[in-house]
Amino acid sequence: MKSPVTSRSAPPLSVRGLTKSFGSTRAVRDVSFDVRSGEVHALLGHNGSGKSTLVKMISGLVRPDSGGFNVGSGADEVLRIGVVHQDLALCADATVLENCCMGDAVARRGPFVDWDRERRTLLPILDSLAAHFGPSTMVRDLSPANQAVVAIARALKRGATGAPLDLLILDEATARLRGTDADMVLATARRVAAQGGGVLLVTHHMSEVLSAADRATVLASGAVVDTVEVSSTDEEQLLRMVSGRDVTALRRTPPPPKATDQAPLLVLDRVTGEQVHDLSLEIRAGEILGVTGATGAGFEELPYLITRPDRCHDGTIHLGGVLLRGRTYSETRSRGVGVVPADRLINGVYVAASVRENLSPVVRRHNRVLGLVANPKERSWARRTASAFQVRTAGPDAPIGSLSGGNQQKVLLARVLEDRPKVLILHEPTQGVDEPTRRALIEIVRGAARAGTAVLYVSCDVDEVAGAADRVLVLRDGRCVHESPGGLDRADAIYAASYLTGTTTP
Amino acid sequence: MTTSSKIRTDLTVDSAAAGADSPSRDSSRGEPAAHLQKYALLVALVALIAVFSVLRTETFFSLANLTTIMSIQATAALLAMGVTLVLIIGEFDLSVAAVMGLSASLIAYLTTQHGVSVLLACLVALVLATVVGLVNAALVVGAGLNSFIVTLAVGTLVQGLAIGIAGSMTIGGLPTSLTYPFQSRFLGVQAAFFYMLVVALVLYLVVGRMPIGRRMFFTGNARAAAELAGVRTARVRVGVMMTAGLLAGAAGVMFVGQTGAASPSIADPFLLPAYAAGFLGATAFTPGRFNVWGSVWAVYLLAVGTTGFQFLGLDNWVINVFNGGVLVLAVGLSRFFARRARV
């Protein structure tokens, strides 16, 4: 394809003083770094460190508040960036060639697509990536790693038809891949860099940085900690750099051990689902058990295995000594399980419905009179509940869509806690929530635990889980690989267990 | 990856537009405007009546015409209510017209050709209509098929069966024990109209005031969220689809009672107005939400429009143009209101 000796005057990417705030949260502060020609540059940081906001600004999805960046020479005002996102955005039922033409101007012969020419363009790109599949292969027949290669090929092909690509961004593109699969994609990234462009590798995984990157820029709390040469650093140093945190809502030291004479309230015994394998755990009343891991590690399924025990392929769940079963959440709810699901806008609230309706999609008994909804009674109950949970709203009949994300999340938490559940399951409970609200939410959860609720706190945010929970389990490939007491002091070890392959501490 | 090919009835949100972190806003803006929006449909009906009354004072603006419209449209209103329930839970039922035709023609066939008692014939028709609703539910909820296309298929199938049983000819001469309870008049209006009002009142209480109404609303608009909030969405959907079948069957009973004659395809022209009424009704009373009174009101709005045009001496094609145009407008308006209801 393109000549490997491209004389570039400007670096593929040069970021200067980028800053972005969302409300009161300063997501990215004054970030500056360069990606050099022919280098794989890693962007490393925790969840919430500002990585994704930074990538969104560079790829043009979010407008920066101040600062700027240059891609390549920028001479003709065309930004030659290819971005491969975590979900790859491929169509499984189409061929590799069709996927690579998606979203691009295709070659034409008269009114028809000139597939031959498109194929001739793609073939050398696939060769240069050492792909083992052809343009006619169906994407659904490819392994996840090869699918990632297709996504990279698409980004490059776009460059090949116009001018060469300046920068390829791999935005957590390896997050769902394991071991050799991830290595294969990283090797592809190296080949792209060798062709002269720059590669920005956005990742949590320390091991990927060490094996594939030339330099790494570490972000913490939205700011650059440092940019280092990977050859002159090690794991220890990187770990120290990523954990530059200032989360005051979270507990620093492990809590005093709980009395263990008490029988556990929720017991999972060798539970197996689609992603979770052979997982056993126990939670006592009043205890907050955190579960975390890398994205795709299988912990995301856990909340929904407990709320729908019929989804377990194997194993048993006991609640208060009684076998938990049920084909609907309604059944487990009536047995004392409450869940605050992730993805609030899909699984949590209906934005056009009022706060009152969202507090109680199933109208509570005490708000019914003669089989009808007692509107005045329910309205005043909703008002009381909203104020008890510090929900900032114009009133119980305001649509919940008019509330901020954090306040919507409080409504969800209130809905569940008003049922006085024995077990509270939280899945990413502070998603898209600003810092003060996050503090308030965690305080509400702690209060529920003090009142005797057993809490399962599931999140991919290692710091948050470590700081909020009494005890933390780390999952990888659906299995528990690490157990530790809570406390931010332990966060580095938990982070290492989540993101460093090979340091299994059973 | 594979986006579901569900045809969206819903007035749902694109999640991006919902604004994950928009600051909380005061929702009490423009009170008079909000009221105008709520009652715009009422105003429209009054305005429409006024226009036609001025243009055709002699014929249109008469008590006889008023009571005729009220009586005749009772069946359409009943059908529209069933459609409304299905729309609330985010599905379609395009088999309702066929079920209404099945019910009406079956009663005519059983009572005139086989001497079955009126009560038993009506019972058979209603049970059969509910069974069709159950079949719809099994295919949509059980097998997870797209309700739009499945109910279209079931409707065609049902109509075919109805013609097979009762023949395609119109059967008349029904016993007065069937027609009397519907045709007898009170204040000049056929009793059927009052039965329809009673059903509307009951359904209003169910949808608007009972807890099940809120479960239906959440099931239709945010099924995943409803499920995780403890709503047994499958049960709600099956129940509503069966009720829609039952209401279509009842519309058939009422039709044959009012007209004293029926054939399996008599209800075909009722389908589109029922949906037009459902969507148009969603712009009134509780804008952005399908609701029973809105649908009933919209049925009469459409009827006034079509009769008015007939009185103006316009051809029948105008009715189709009017109904189709109103449906397009109604779908657009209800979506617009649903969007506004969010903030």
Image (cartoon, rainbow, N blue to C red):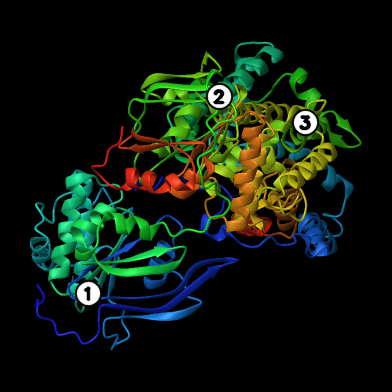
In the image: residue A294, left or right of residue B67: left
Give coordinates of residue A360: x percent, y percent. 69, 37
Q: Position of residue A319 (x, y in %)?
A: 53, 19
What amino acid is found at the position of numbered circle 3 in the picture?
Val
- Look at mark 1 in the image and give the residue it sits on: A165
Depth check: give the residue in front, A360 or A236. A236
The three-letter amino acid code for the residue at tag 2 is: Ala
**The disc label shown at residue B202, or none:** 3
| Distance from the alpha carbon under mark 2 to that under mark 3 | 56 Å
Q: Chain of mark 3?
A: B
Residue type pointed to by label 1: Leu
Q: Earlier in the sequence, mark 2 or mark 1?
A: 1
Specify the quadrant that holds the C terminus of chain A. Answer: top left
x 48%, y 48%: residue: A488
Q: Which residue is mark 2?
A: A259
Q: Residues within 10 Å of mark 3 (few under 14, many from 20)?
A: some
Element under disc 2: loop
- Relative image position of residue A465 (x, y in whole percent): 48, 44
**Which-is-in-front pick, marks 2 and 3?**
2
Asked if the residues shown at circle 2 and circle 1 are in contact, with their CB atoms under 8 angstroms apart, the answer is no
